[in-house]
């Protein structure tokens, strides 16, 4: 199963358009900060990266 992660986040997401991803990215763009792309990875890879907890906003 694929999940979605961001470089700085500490959870994995079931949708790349989750509000917990999109909202902070919009804020970062507004502030002129670097926005890292959302990555699609396996759940095992997400866990290896320390993102084992699912996002409560888009949890399956």
Image: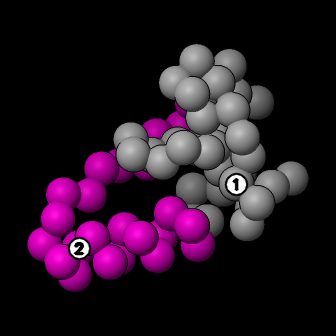
User: How many numbered markers are drawn?
Assistant: 2
- Which quadrant would the N terminus be assigned to in this image? top right
Q: Mark 1 falls on what kind of element?
A: loop
Is the residue 18 above or below the residue 8 in the image? below
Is the residue 40 above or below the residue 15 in the image? above
User: How are the residues colored?
Assistant: one colour
Tag of residue 29: 2
Q: Mark 2 falls on what kind of element?
A: helix
Residue 52 x/y as whole percent: 69, 32
35 with respect to 39 (left or right): left
Which one is earlier in the sequence, the residue at label 2 or at label 1?
2
4 with respect to 55 (left or right): left
Residue 53: quarter of image: top right
Tag of residue 23: none
Residue 35 x/y as whole percent: 26, 58
Name the residue carrying label 1.
55
User: Does 30 lie within the magenta span?
Assistant: yes
Q: CA distance from mark 2 to mark 1?
A: 22 Å
30 with respect to 42 (left or right): left
User: Does 55 lie within the magenta span?
Assistant: no
34 with respect to 1 (left or right): left
- Range shown magenta: 19-41
């Amino acid at each position: 199963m694929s999940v979605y992660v961001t470089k700085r986040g500490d959870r994995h997401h079931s949708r790349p358009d989750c509000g917990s991803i999109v909202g902070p990215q919009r804020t970062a763009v507004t502030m002129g900060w670097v926005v890292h792309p959302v990555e699609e990875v396996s759940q095992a890879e997400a866990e290896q990266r320390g993102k084992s907890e699912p996002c409560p906003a888009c949890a399956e």
